[in-house]
Amino acid sequence: MKPLRIALTKGRLEKHTASLLEQAGYGCGSLRDKGRRLILPVGGGEIEAVLAKAADVITYVEHGVCDLGVVGKDTIAEMGHHFFEILDLGFGRCAFALAAPRGADFYAGYGVKTIATKYPSIARRFFESKHMDVRVIKIEGSVELAPLLGLSDGIVDIVETGATLRENGLEVVERIMEVSARLIVNPASMKLRKAEIDQLTKRLSNVTAA
């Protein structure tokens, strides 16, 4: 039988996933010493890891070329999804937050606020839930620049320690959503390879619960 194919988000989540898989009893030597390879055998060949950018992990799982994926809740929330989210892996923890210049009363006044963000869908949903009319500008780089340059009244971004905000004269106004790495599964794979996926999930769950 062909190996279960799992797409991993390259970078920190990839390294954390490798550690988790090792703790669950799957050998990850190939992931530790991968060179430039993007498809690697894991656990004696019963799993095949595919290394990809976060948005592509979702694409590969949705289209069924990968059975499973490990991706941050931030990417899931921004892109929407047609897959099952079956396990919170417990690492990569951070939060979405609304931030604004220190000392500013963001919610004061009645004018339309301008928000800069890399995550326009999440930002729009957040302000819609508050029945606020906002103008959202998508930024690809350092979002903290936008209020400093007068482009926006605030930002919606991922916050870990808050150090970058403080260094740029910004502060958290409100936390929006907690984020961590999640295990996702293609619906067809969940039906056709349920026993294998259940076994993998159980082994990972035992580690995360320990």
Image: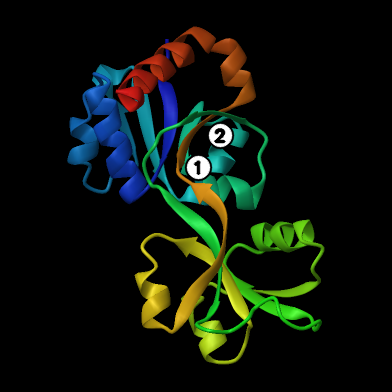
Residue 162 visible to an observer of this rendering: yes
Residue 138 visible to an observer of this rendering: no
Q: Nearer the viewer, residue 141 or 149?
A: 149
List the residue tagged with mark 1.
Answer: 57
Measuring 73% from the left and 57% from the top, which residue is drawn there?
Answer: 125
Measuring 55% from the left and 83% from the top, which residue is drawn there?
Answer: 146
Measuring 53% from the left and 72% from the top, which residue is drawn there?
Answer: 140
Dot 2 lies on which element?
Answer: helix
Callout count: 2
- Above or below, 58 relative to 43: below
Measuring 47% from the left and 16% from the top, which residue is drawn there?
Answer: 197
- Above or below, 105 relative to 201: below
Image location (x, y in percent) of residue 129 = 76, 56
Question: Which amino acid, mark 2?
Answer: Val
Question: Which amino acid, mark 1?
Answer: Val
List the residue tagged with mark 2.
Answer: 61
Quadrant of the frame with the C terminus? top left
**Residue 137: mark in rendering:** none
Most distant residue in the bottom direction: 149
Quadrant of the frame with the N terminus? top left
Q: Nearer the viewer, residue 43 or 207?
A: 207
- Residues at discs 1 and 2 in contact (Cβ within 8 Å): yes
- Above or below, 84 relative to 110: above
Image location (x, y in percent) of residue 186 = 59, 27
Image location (x, y in percent) of residue 64 = 58, 29
Q: Residues within 10 Å of mark 1 (few under 14, many from 20)?
A: many
Q: Residues within 10 Å of mark 2 (few under 14, many from 20)?
A: many
Which color mode does the image show?
Answer: rainbow
On screen, residue 132 versus residue 172, left or right, reads right
Distance, label 1 to label 2, CA atoms, is 6 Å
- Classify residue 24 by image quadrant: top left
- Classify residue 131 by image quadrant: bottom right
